[in-house]
Amino acid sequence: MRINVNDISHVTSDLGQRFAIHLAAIANNIDSKEAQALWQAVAIRYNEPQRAYHTLRHIEQLFAQFERVKQHLNAPHIIALALYYHDVIYEPTRSDNELKSAEYAIESLSPYLTTEQCQRIYVLIMMTATHQLDELMDANKRSDAAYLLDMDLSVLGTAWSEYAQYASAVRQEYAHVPVTDYRTGRTAVLKGLLAHSKLYLTEYYFERLEKQARDNIKREITALAA
């Protein structure tokens, strides 16, 4: 859903302050002007005209989730930066957005973060393409990644009215796809989600959102078939 023009300054200001705090907590030799420049570059991309769901509003929603689970995270600042950058490159006609977003993040952050920190953010962003955990990660990193992936899918478990807005925004982003093709493709994606034994990887999200998410997905599939 596109951000109302009257909301842009508020969202940008709040998210920008959060961005600077998380970055400064782990970055080396970065001043406020550099942090502001990095944030402005991110914000401009999230407000591109081809976006309807993958906007700053999406990032704001993710950080509402972040505040609820941050006490469970081992590296909250790394997770926060991965959230900021995970959709920074988004073009609905392409299939490599996660890769391009991960590369953009590393290029932007490498002057300030260690190689290990950058690599971790890169891996986290790449996992949002499949929403599958890398089983080779150590337990702490795997736990953090699970929370990030669950936050990214948390919209599926919202009340139907909010879910319906999300589904409508996704359709808007794929307006270039003919109706019949969209119905076929979207239905396949949704059935693929239902095929997973668990949509949510953490106990926190599974207990709170799993049932609602499955009900919402089934309802959208029915609507697509109508």
Image: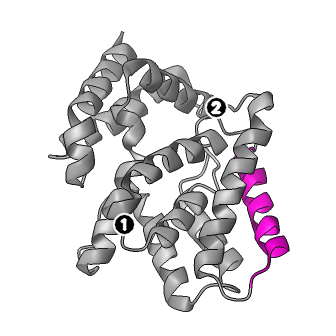
* Picture disc at residue 176: 2
* Residue type at tag 1: Leu
Q: Main secondary structure of the magenta part?
A: helix
Which residues make up the magenta segment? 30-47
- Contact between marks 2 and 1 (CB within 8 A): the answer is no
Q: Is residue 43 left or right of residue 224?
A: right
- Residue 145 in the image: state x and y as whole percent: 35, 65
Q: Which residue is at the front of the view, 35 or 183?
A: 35
The residue located at (20%, 31%) in the rendering is 211
* Residue type at tag 2: His
Dot 1 alpha-carbon crowd within 10 angstroms: few under 14, some 14 to 19, many 20 or more: some
In the figure, 74 relative to 175: above or below? below
Q: Secondary structure at mark 2?
A: loop
**Quick one: which residue is furthest to the left in this view?**
197
The residue located at (37%, 23%) in the rendering is 159
Residue 102 appears anywhere in the view: yes
- Residue 65 in the image: state x and y as whole percent: 44, 47
In primary-sequence order, the first of circles 2 and 1 is 1
Q: Secondary structure at mark 1?
A: loop
Q: Quadrant of residue 114?
A: bottom right
